[in-house]
Image (cartoon, rainbow, N blue to C red):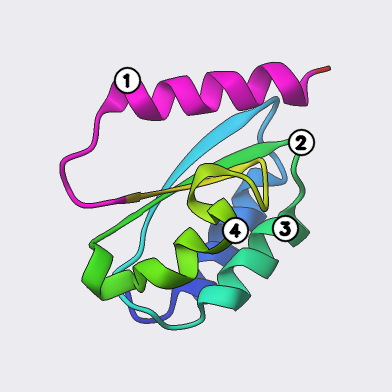
Amino acid sequence: MSRPLVALGEVTAILREAPGPTLVLFQLDSRLQEAEVVLAIRAAGQKAVFWQLFGWRHSIGESFWIQGGMYRGRVLPNLAVHFSANWSDRAVTRRFTRWRKKALV
């Protein structure tokens, strides 16, 4: 996907109709539009959707995502980034559950 904003826009449009907290798994494959992706996720709202992004360190620009702990949700609490293909569904679910508990308060 070399145009992540297009796909992100389509997902965001669908999510406007989704009831309750939603987990979105989104794979990135390039360093294109990193800041714009973050801004689009922020604009989508923090209460309705948790975004779990995935990608290889070298292809998505690890240095951008680790600044300020962004990959751990320190910049946007509803955003987490995982680097590599070997991810744990348990870890993703745990991050979503923690966010959902805070979002519903």
Residue topped by disc 1 = 90
C-beta proximity under 8 Å, tags 1 and 3: no
Q: Which residues lie in the magenta part?
A: 83-104
How far apart marks 1 and 3 lie (CA) works out to 25 Å
User: Which mark identifies residue 42?
Assistant: 3
Give the image location of residue 79, x and y in percent: 57, 47
Residue 26 against residue 22 in the figure, above or below: below
| Amino acid type, residue under disc 2 in the picture | Lys
Mark 1 or 3, nearer chain start: 3
Instruction: Say which residue appears at 25% left-offset and 29% top-offset.
Output: 88
Pointer 4 residue: 68
Q: Quadrant of residue 47?
A: top right
* Dot placed on the residue nearer the N-terminal end, 4 or 2: 2
Classify mark 1: helix, strand or loop: helix
Q: Distance from label 2 to label 1 (Cα)?
A: 22 Å
Spatial CA distance of label 4 from label 3 is 16 Å
Left or right of 15? Residue 71 is: left
Given this view, does label 4 or label 3 mark the residue nearer the observer? 4
Query: Which amino acid type corresponds to the residue marked 1 in the rendered image?
Result: Arg
- On the image, the x and y values in percent for residue 48 come to 72, 36
**Residue drawn at the location 47% of the way across and 63% of the way down:** 65
In depth, the one of 13 and 83 nearer the eye is 83
Residue 47 is tagged as 2
- Type of amino acid at the residue the image marks with label 4: Gly
- Please, which residue is most extreme toward the left here? 86
Cα distance in 3D space between marks 4 and 1: 24 Å
Q: Quadrant of the C terminus?
A: top right
Q: Are marks 4 and 3 in contact (CB under 8 Å)?
A: no
Q: Going from the N terminus, do you reach mark 2 or mark 1 first?
A: 2
